[in-house]
Image (tube, rainbow, N blue to C red):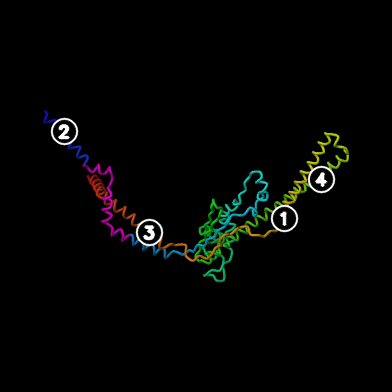
Amino acid sequence: MIVLKTDTTENLMTTEQKKVDSPASDDHEGPTLQEILIPIWANRKRILLISFVVALVTLGINFLLPVYYKSTATLLPETQKDKLSALGQFADIANLAGVSVPGSEIARLYPTIVNSETILRSVIFKKYKTEEFPDSTTLLDYFDFDEETEQKKVSRAINQMRDLLDASYEAKTSIVHLNLEMQEPELSAVVLNEIIAQLDEFMRKKRLANASEQVRWLSVRIGDVSEELKEAEEDLRRFREANRQVSFSPQLSVQQERLIRNVQVNSAIYVELRKQMELARLEEVKNTTIVNVLDVAQPPVKKGRPKRATNSVLAFLGSVVVLSMGAAAKGIYGEQIKRSIHAMQSSKRS
């Protein structure tokens, strides 16, 4: 009986040792670094050769792609004095009331405005001198889209300009960056400067329209306040004519002070409205630049895209990574996959 127990114990230990040494335990732990590197090293020549071919193909495709040149421009936020909104006219009063009126609020809208159809439509119908058209042509003819109607051509040209134009706003500095890519360096700079000019023209028209609206509103308001001031002055005059001795009557003194205060308040409102009227009239005739340009667009010296060297290197590295992963997976799990496929085929035959 003792011998049988000893044999049984040895059999159990042997079984447990086999479980420890079995491949299932290795599969649970995952492949080692050596198991990953061995198939990659074995296929290194093939990996490098295929990656080099992919890089060459990528370089060839990049040579076939059209070359684009990128021009850049930088716009500063508007100053406090150049605000277009009615709130900007009363900025001092707003500040006294505790309301902050930052000078970069309108600059935040520049990226949206330059990508609008209003701006881009004017830009594409402007004539420019190009290498293909020395006598100047519009961007609509320059793009030469094959569309049935003029409206479709315009719509496609506007979408093309939106793809080529990049406008961004920096929240910390309130600076706007504009980038435009075209196939000619000179054309890229000229068109981007035209976009800025159209932006400035758009802002001027908005300022003029706002100033004209202010003039109309102030004219009506000044008329109403003027009538109220005349009535207040007339009430004070009649009171003084009817009451020559006011100092001996507290009630009459209080009433007189009230009438005087009413005249003073209406007079102060009238004077302030007259000042705002003069400012609004100045805005109507003022023809100064609104958009503050820090850096105007200059013809770029180097092309913006395609970046042939960068794209080729990235294609080479990407191919090396993908092929290495494939070689490692095949080396580690290839035999298991083959056995699984063979087992499935055998089961189907049986």
Q: Is residue 350 left or right of residue 132?
A: left
Residue on which disc 3 sits: 315
Badge 1 marks a residue whose secondary structure is: helix
Counting other residues with Cα less than 10 Å from the Cα at mark 3, is it few (<14), some (14-19), or many (20 or more)? many
Q: Which residue is mark 2?
A: 9
Q: Magenta part mainly helix, strand or loop? A: helix
Q: Quadrant of the C terminus?
A: top left
Q: Which mark is residue 338?
A: none
Q: Earlier in the sequence, mark 2 or mark 1?
A: 2
Query: How far apart in space, not on screen, are marks 3 and 2 (Cα)?
Result: 61 Å
The disc labelled 1 sits on which kind of residue? Arg
Residue at the spot of label 4: 230
State yes or no: residue 42 in magenta: yes
Q: Quadrant of residue 15?
A: top left
Query: How crowded is the residue under tag 4: few (<14 C-alpha within 10 Å), some, or many (20+)?
Result: some
The amino acid type of the residue labelled 2 equals Thr
* Label located before the other in sequence (1 or 3): 1
Residue at mark 2 to residue at mark 4: CA–CA distance: 120 Å
Q: Nearer the viewer, residue 169 or 268?
A: 268
Label located before the other in sequence (2 or 4): 2
Q: Which amino acid, mark 3?
A: Ala
Element carrying mark 2: helix
Distance from disc 4 to disc 1, alpha carbons, whole Å, reads: 25 Å
Q: Amino acid at mark 4?
A: Lys
Q: Secondary structure at mark 4?
A: helix
Q: Is residue 39 above or below residue 9?
A: below
For the point 29% across and 52% down, the residue is: 328
Q: Nearer the viewer, mark 4 or mark 3?
A: 4
The residue stretch that appears in magenta: 21-50
Task: Confirm whether the magenta stretch covers residue 228.
Answer: no
Left of 102 or right of it: where is 301?
A: left
